Image: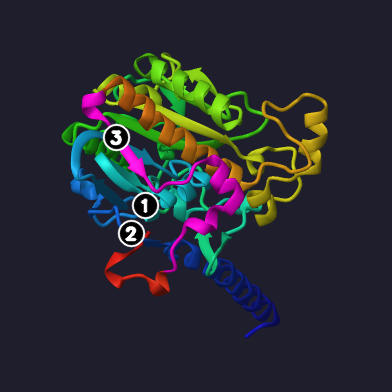
Amino acid sequence: MSHEWKIKSIIIILIIFIMIAGGIPLYKHRHFNITIVAGPGVTKVVKLSEYCKSLKGTMADTNVFILEGKKEGGKALIMANTHSNEPASLLTALIFVENAIVEKGTLIIIPQFNNSGGRNTRPGDGYPLYFEIQTDWGKKKFRMGNREASPLDQWPDPDVYIHYPDRQLLSFIDIRNTNRTWPGRPDGPLMERVCYAAMEIMRSEKVDIAIDLHGAETMFPVTNCIVAPEKSMRIATLTSLTVKAMEGFENHVEPSPEGFRGLSHREIGDYSDTMPFLLEAPVPFLDQPTGPKTMDLLLNGKDPFLLSLSKQGKLFVPYDETGWPMRKRVGQHCSVILELFRQFSRKFSDKAIIVRNVPRYAEVVKNGVGHYYHDPKKADKKRIYYN
């Protein structure tokens, strides 16, 4: 073998080694499962593919937890991790899964709505692959996901995404964004099928209200709020006013834009009888002018650059040296969800949705998010699920 071929061989071996070394952590992240302990209120667990058969066997399939009350009433759907880089939504959903008791009505929860996105990441932005929540029994580990589904599961992206059925032209990347692919279709791209399955849950189960949990930058005006279309506006407004007055945290209402298609808070209301709500909590981690995208920033929301911008009046939420810790974000989501249930039940008493054993804002801020998660080692093995 010539000297030139020896050099080329060494370079090829080095490239292969680098690819393997870099690929192993991403492979482990994609196949890492979060442990969920089904609480005493969970009566049934099914797969999303039961509502759209073409999801079966794909990375988009995910667990659906059903909590049925002893008394008939209304039905509510909670969807979390539509955008998997907004983890307060997942943490909130798991508090409900592991603790909620439904006294009247039915609660349906999809903790990992975009399961493919939850197994994707953004190495170019320096996202951590995992984060950990301190609990009463140790640390609970979670994957840090991405806004869009993995290209390993849905590819190729078109030059322009033509939204179905309105044919509005959207960005090419929106075809992997499950808050742009509503109402979906059973034979469309994978993320359209995910949204179609959720629509089938709402139509077949006659769901009364649907809540889509999100987070947004502190520099984005649509944050710390409830987004609602016309049919949901009264309940959203009463909820916002009540939590501000009674629980002391900022919350406002944003109208769902009629001309921007593919959004859950628009399409659910237009294509079903369900009343949709989208909840936004502040996520300093997502702001561009921050320091490194560390786990500490993700969990505590403290950043000197954002603090400086806050003093200049550049942020859309209150921000001081305490940052925006995860416990505040999750606590707000819990309180707003419970208040939506209460306001809906007041207006539609024959369809009341009564849920207990879920903490509100002040309790989560005081006790921490992890206080409400159960130790899988001490749980009944039949009540443990992986996602």
Decide which of tag 3 and tag 2 comes sooner along the chain.
Answer: 2
- The circle drawn on residue 40 is none
Dot 3 falls on a residue whose secondary structure is loop
Decide which of tag 1 and tag 2 comes sooner along the chain.
Answer: 2
Q: Residue at x 42, y 40 (%)?
A: 176
Could you classify mark 2 by the number of other residues whose Cα lies within 10 Å: few (under 14), some (14-19), or many (20 or more)? many
Asked if disc 3 and disc 1 are in contact, CB closer than 8 Å, the reply is no
Decide which of tag 3 and tag 1 comes sooner along the chain.
Answer: 1
- Amino acid, disc 1: Val
| Res 150 visible | no
Residue depth check, mark 3 versus mark 1: number of the one nearer the observer: 3
In this rendering, the answer to whether 172 lies above or below 270 is below
In the picture of the structure, the residue carrying the numbered disc 2 is: 38
In the picture of the structure, the residue carrying the numbered disc 3 is: 353
- Amino acid, disc 2: Ala
- Amino acid, disc 3: Ile
Answer whether residue 361 is magenta in the image.
yes
Q: Nearer the viewer, residue 60 or 316?
A: 316
Q: Residue at x 76, y 47 (%)?
A: 291
In the picture of the structure, the residue carrying the numbered disc 1 is: 97
Asked if disc 1 and disc 2 are in contact, CB closer than 8 Å, the reply is yes
Q: Position of residue 160 (x, y in %)?
A: 44, 29
Residue span colored magenta: 349-375
